[in-house]
Image (spheres, helix red, strand yellow):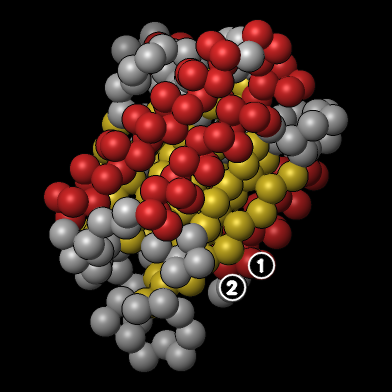
């Protein structure tokens, strides 16, 4: 039976005074979320906090049956929609945070070997398998749309001055389109959820190299954040790391 364990870290980075990222790891290690806020010194942090609080509350109040994939997918859609409504309504009610928004990536571990992921914006989910990084999510950003259209290379996108302009987020519209991605995981896989502060500095191969060199999720988190800070970290950086183990491993959640 598949087992897993997880860890998370966040840092304001080298150039920002305030951390507008938030994350959530459920006590049972089945739900994981990263949110990256925007909208000024107050608004961004508030938006991301509202989003992860919506995930936390829904998991506590009405968790889906973990053996029912369709129920989990529906729960993710409903939960992210509610998170969007919470941010949108707060921005409508409070003029000091009008225009705030947040990205979000949420993952739920189903019973068995399926991880269900939902996301809005440019926070990412990676799978690292056999040392190779696989980006599971598509950034909802101007630059990545240009990459997908063949107008920019990935390398050009990394240094494009508009790389932080996103095309979709929570809180800017009353309703939001949500992408969903299932992934089949197996022992020795790693999942990395992160705000865009990580891939802004580290290439995908650097992210996978860190998982290959370490065997504890908390050590991987520390090293990913450290390398991002060493690279200048112009933005906040948040990572949630999940390590999958085989059934013979002594530690981890089943």
Residue at 83% from the left image edge and 35% from the top image edge: 14
Q: Is residue 14 left or right of residue 121?
A: right
Point out residue 162 in the picture as x, y percentages from the top left corner.
58, 10
Above or below, comparing residue 188 to residue 153 in the picture: below
* Image position, residue 157 (x, y; %): 52, 19
Q: Is 88 in front, or is 15?
A: 88
Quadrant (top left, top right, bottom left, bottom right) of the N terminus? bottom left
Q: Residues within 10 Å of mark 1 (few under 14, many from 20)?
A: some
Could you tell me residue 20's position as x and y percent?
A: 68, 32
Q: Is residue 13 visible?
A: yes
> In the displayed structure, would residue 19 be above or below residue 106?
above
The image's mark for residue 219 is: 1
The local crowd at label 2, few if under 14, some if 14 to 19, many if 20 or more residues have their Cα within 10 Å, is: some
Tag 2 near tag 1, CB within 8 Å = yes
Report the side of 229 relative to 219 (left or right). Answer: right
Tag 2 residue: 216
Q: Residue at x 62, y 42 (%)?
A: 22
Element carrying mark 2: loop
148 to 104, vertically: above or below: above
Report x, y in % for residue 123: 50, 34
Above or below, comparing residue 8 to residue 93 in the picture:
below
Residue at 43% over, 26% down:
84
The C terminus lies in which quarter of the figure? bottom left
């Amino acid at each position: 039976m598949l087992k897993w364990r997880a860890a998370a870290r966040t840092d304001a980075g080298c150039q920002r005074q305030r951390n507008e990222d938030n994350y959530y790891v459920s006590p049972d290690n089945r739900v994981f979320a990263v949110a990256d806020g925007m909208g000024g010194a107050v608004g961004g942090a508030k938006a991301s906090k509202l989003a992860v609080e919506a995930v936390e509350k829904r998991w506590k109040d009405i968790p889906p049956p973990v053996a029912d994939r369709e129920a989990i997918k529906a729960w993710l859609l409903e939960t992210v929609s509610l998170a969007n409504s919470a941010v949108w309504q707060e921005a409508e009610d409070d003029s000091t945070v009008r225009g705030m928004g947040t990205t979000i990536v949420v993952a739920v571990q189903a019973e068995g070997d399926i991880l269900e992921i939902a996301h809005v914006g440019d926070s990412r989910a990676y799978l690292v398998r056999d040392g190779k990084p696989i980006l599971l999510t598509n950034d909802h950003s101007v630059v990545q749309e240009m990459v997908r259209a063949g107008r920019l290379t990935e390398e050009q996108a990394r240094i494009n001055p508009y790389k932080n302009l996103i095309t979709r987020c929570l809180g800017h519209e009353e309703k939001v389109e949500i992408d969903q991605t299932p992934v089949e995981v197996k022992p020795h896989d790693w999942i990395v959820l992160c705000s865009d502060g990580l891939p802004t500095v580290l290439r995908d191969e650097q992210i996978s190299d860190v998982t290959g060199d370490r065997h504890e999720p908390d050590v991987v988190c520390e090293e990913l954040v450290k390398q991002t800070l060493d690279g200048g970290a112009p933005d906040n950086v948040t990572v949630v790391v999940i390590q999958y183990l085989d059934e013979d491993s002594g530690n981890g959640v089943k």
